[in-house]
Image (spheres, rainbow, N blue to C red):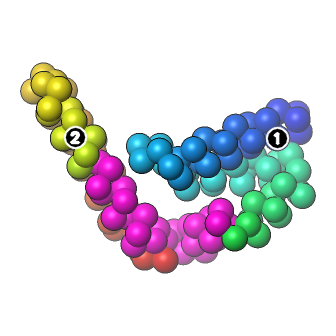
Amino acid sequence: MRYLWALFGLLALALGTIGIVAPLLPTVPFLLLAAFCFSKSSERLHNWLLSHPTFGPPIADWNERGAISLAAKRLATISIVVVFGISIAIGLRTTLLLIQAATLSCVLLFIWTRPNS
C-alpha cells in the first residue's frame, strides 16, 4: 500500500509542477495532495517536500493558517477571467456560460476570503 501512496504522491507532485507553468492547472492543491500521500508512504519524501524552497512555503502557509499568497490569488483571478473570456469567444451556449460563471464565482469567493500568506 505504501507504494501506491508513493505513486499517487509522485503523480500529484508532477501535476503540481506542471501547474507552475500551465496557468489553468492548480499547483498548491496538487502539492497538498502530494504531501498527504507522502505522509502515508515515505517520511523522506514528505520531509523533502515540506522543506523544499519552492514547494514547501505554500504548503506550510495552508497548513498553518489556511492562507493563500496574494500573488497566487491574483494569478488565479487572471486565469479564471481568461478562461471565461475564451468560453465567451468560442460561443458557448448561455446555459453553459451561466453554470461556468456561477462555479468560477464560487472559486473566486473561496480564494479571496482566505487570509494572505
Label 2 belongs to which residue?
A: 84
Task: Give coordinates of residue 9: x percent, y percent.
Answer: 74, 43
Query: Of circles 2 and 1, which is in front?
Result: 2
Left or right relative to 109: residue 101 = left
Label 1 belongs to which residue?
A: 6
- Image quadrant for the N terminus? top right
Residue positioned 43% across, 76% down in the render:
116
Task: Name the mark on residue 24.
Answer: none
| SS assignment at label 1 | helix
Task: Give coordinates of residue 113: x percent, y percent.
Answer: 34, 67
74 falls in the magenta region: yes
Residue positioned 79% across, 35% down in the render:
7
- The one nearer the camera, 109 or 117, is 117
Task: Give coordinates of residue 8: x percent, y percent.
Answer: 73, 37
- The one nearer the camera, 102 or 9, is 9
Span of residues in magenta? 54-80
Kind of residue indicated by mark 2: Phe
Task: Give coordinates of residue 3: x percent, y percent.
Answer: 88, 35
The answer, for residue 28, to whether it is visible in the render is yes
Kind of residue indicated by mark 1: Ala
The answer to whether the residue labelled 2 contacts the one labelled 1, judged by CB atoms less than 8 Å apart, is no
